[in-house]
Image (spheres, rainbow, N blue to C red):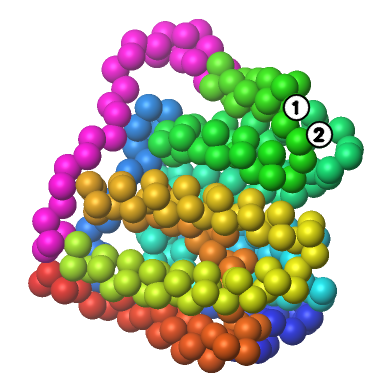
Amino acid sequence: MIRLFLDNRTGVLFLLPLILGVYVLASVLGLQNEVITRTDGLFFQHAILGTVSTYFLQSFLLLLNAVLLNAVFNSHEFLDKNTYIISLIYLVLTPMFVPLNTFDGTLLAHSFMIFCLSILFQLKQNSDGKIIAFNAGLFVSMAILFMPYLLLVIPFILMMIVIIRPFIWRELILFLSGVCIPIIYYFSYLFFTAQLDFNWIWPSWGMPTDKQLFNVYPIVGLFAIIALISLFSLGARLLKSSLRLKKQIQMLGLLFAFFILLGSVDFFFSGSLQYLSLAIIPLTYFLTYAFLSKRSGILASIFFYITLLYSFVKFFISFTE
């Protein structure tokens, strides 16, 4: 399957709905383990939808994000040929972190972060970047509305901009303006609808017990192994990359480090995987290089297939019952 998606065959994208359909069926027929959500908070409250509409919305967003993430990879020439393995990796890893039977805004935050990446990769050394900086701020702000802790990503986005081009004050101001506009509109809406009463509930951290995390530990373990394999193979790729590609990978590495830090802290204190799921976005690119590496290609493929198998099996097992 990996080789099939690595090739330049657009038709493999039609397999994605079939694979996702198996996940949905497994979720419907399998055990419904308790999920700790972290996206309820200052800007977005947990949405209660019907079962069918929830599965449809989550599935649609999952497919959309997989295709968009793959399109960003191909359009910005991370490889010398088009590949569609990105969409497969995202589709396999994400359902382990984000439940398909609950809508909490996580996948929408993924969408806006993918759009933000696509915008940032359009930056060039000697071209005007003011419009790009402003649009990137808009997309980051939209992601913050759904996952409030992403407010901390703002300085990391600014560092990503500096990697690709010199620091310019006007771009900084426009980026921050883009961040502020959706939030201002949101608070204005609350004000004019008489909902601005400051009774929002911030997500509260509560140390989870080992029993609550037994179903989560295998997911985190497999994710950590795949991440280490991917990062190990990344060094060899950087040696043979162009200067532009090196900068793009550095940008992804910075974002990956932030998502790992934020997600790990939140997981340690709450047991939730929602924020850690954001690290899947840059990891899909790194794992693609691992598959193509002579040193770690076989090892990466083995653990990916193990992850693929567990991503289905987990719907039917529970370590706490």
From the image, state whether disc 2 or disc 1 is nearer to you.
1
Res. 283 image quadrant: bottom right
Residue drawn at (75%, 27%), measured in percent from left and top?
Answer: 168
Q: Is residue 202 magenta?
A: yes
Q: Residues within 10 Å of mark 1 (few under 14, many from 20)?
A: few
Q: Secondary structure at mark 2?
A: loop
Query: Which residue carries the number 1 mark?
Result: 168
Relative placement, left or right, of 154 versus 162 is: left
Magenta segment:
185-212
- The secondary structure making up most of the magenta span is loop
Mark 2 touching mark 1, by CB under 8 A?
yes
Q: The disc labelled 1 sits on which kind of residue?
A: Ile
Name the residue that disc number 2 marks.
129
Q: Is 203 a magenta residue?
A: yes
Q: Residue 268 vs residue 2: left or right?
A: left
Res. 89 in view: no
